[in-house]
Image (cartoon, grey):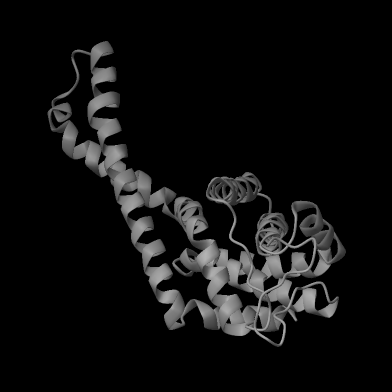
Amino acid sequence: MILSAARLAARDVVSPPFRGTLWKVLGLTAVALIALWFAVRWLFEVVAIPFFARFAPDMPSWADNAGTYAGLAAGIALALLMAFLIAPVSAIIAGLFLDDVAEVVERTDYADAAPGVALPFLRGIVLSIKFFGIVILGNLVAFALLWVPVVNVGAFFIVNGYLLGREYFQFAALRYRSEEDASAMRHRYGTRIFLAGLVIALILAIPIVNLVTPLFAAAMMVHLHQKLARREFSLPLRPADGAVRPDPGFPA
């Protein structure tokens, strides 16, 4: 079931319906990183160098080229941080489009099910920030254990697998369930969701490819939720006449 959901998600990410969202995420991520580069350069040129110059008026001659050195320092700093920044930046941006991803998956592969309900805008913003924080937290924990042999790799996958699996499944389930029901379902299938989270963590660990992690994760968990819900008959289906009449307890 997990491998099937991963295979379908990989297919979805490169499919025509996803391409518009994919280009939006990649474009906005690039814009955000470029803006960050200029922000770091500004910080060096306008803030850091004048600050130190105030306490060291007899700075050496190379300080006359402060702008050049600031730009170089900013570039080096961002190059070192790129592997750390690219995943969380893309996560917070992609979080704004996750409902679009879910709708495509549900419409394409689960047309017999009642459509899920998109999260309210503010709830979606909170969820996007939450995903950003999760990716940051997971990578900080892994970074803290970087110098511990073997443990570092295990920590990265265990922490990210648990957090990413938990939150992306919750997102997919909330389109059909209350928060309490979504959490209860997540606990019933905790092992499967964790294993699915490990697959997502593997994608996150691959440079460049990790740009599509949020879209892949959302699609995979929509597939997984649909499969699990159908197994326990807890998913509202379209009646034969095509009308949509969700069961009580599901969002209308």
Q: Position of residue 140 (x, y in %)?
A: 60, 45
Closer to the camera, 47 or 69?
47
Closer to the camera, 175 or 143?
175
Residue 205 appears in view? no
Specify whether 25 is left or right of 138: left
Question: Which residue is painted at 58% across and 51% down in the image?
Answer: 131
Asked if residue 80 is positioned above or below residue 15 in the image, the reply reads above
Q: Position of residue 96 (x, y in %)?
A: 49, 56
Q: Position of residue 203 (x, y in %)?
A: 57, 69
Closer to the camera, 137 or 123?
123
Specify whether 105 is left or right of 192: left
Asked if residue 89 is positioned above or below residue 193 in the image, the reply reads above
Question: Which residue is painted at 64% across and 78% down in the image?
Answer: 6
Specify whether 140 is left or right of 43: right
Question: Which residue is painted at 28% across and 11% down in the image?
Answer: 55
Residue 203 appears in view? yes
Q: Position of residue 236 (x, y in %)?
A: 75, 73
Closer to the camera, 239 or 211?
239
Q: Quadrant of residue 61?
A: top left
Q: Quadrant of residue 168?
A: bottom right
